[in-house]
Amino acid sequence: MKTVLVVDDSRIMRNIVKNTFSSMNIPCQFVEASNGKQALALLDGQKFDLVLLDWNMPELSGLDFLKTVRANDRYKSLPIIMVTSEAARYNVIEALKNGATDYIIKPVNEKSFREKLSKITF
């Protein structure tokens, strides 16, 4: 079974992301983090198959989490999809330049998840 790390400071958003993902009938278990710092700690202790990452969070932003993770060879091939309301072209480019596998703009839906997941081995 695949393990997905859902990182968002909003519990409601984490639930929406999990529910949308679950509705696609992909058997996986979810681990949640409410900020980038917590997510980094979880990443060190467990193997994840995918990270769904918000941009704006306290303690450590999604972009800073991304930079930190991509600086570690251990996580070079870990798929990380930004799931955020930051829709500006600049933000998308910045995230991809720093190693995001893909980018989904909130509100999330099954179609956008399917499209992004079809591009990665999940």
Image (spheres, helix red, strand yellow):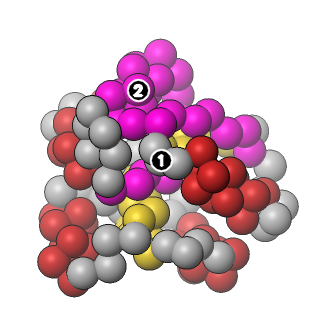
Q: Is residue 69 visible?
A: no
Q: Residues within 10 Å of mark 1 (few under 14, many from 20)?
A: many
Camera-side residue: 74 or 112?
112
Q: Is residue 6 left or right of residue 69?
A: right
Q: Which residues are magenta?
A: 28-55
Residue 19, x across and y down, in percent: 75, 58
Q: Residue drawn at (32%, 79%), measured in percent from left and top?
A: 87
Residue 101, x across and y down, in percent: 36, 62
Q: Dot 1 corresponds to which residue?
A: 8
Q: Quadrant of the C terminus?
A: bottom right
Q: Is residue 73 left or right of residue 117?
A: left
Q: Dot 2 corresponds to which residue?
A: 38
Q: Which picture quadrant has residue 68? A: top left
Camera-side residue: 16 or 68?
16
Numbered disc 1: secondary structure? loop
Numbered disc 2: secondary structure? helix
Residue 31, x across and y down, in percent: 61, 34
Determine whether 86 is above or below 100 in the image. below
Determine whether 51 is above or below 16 in the image. above
Camera-side residue: 2 or 67?
67
Determine whether 91 is above or below 99 in the image. below
Is residue 41 covered in magenta? yes
Is residue 23 covered in magenta? no
Q: Residue drawn at (50%, 34%), measured in percent from left and top?
A: 33
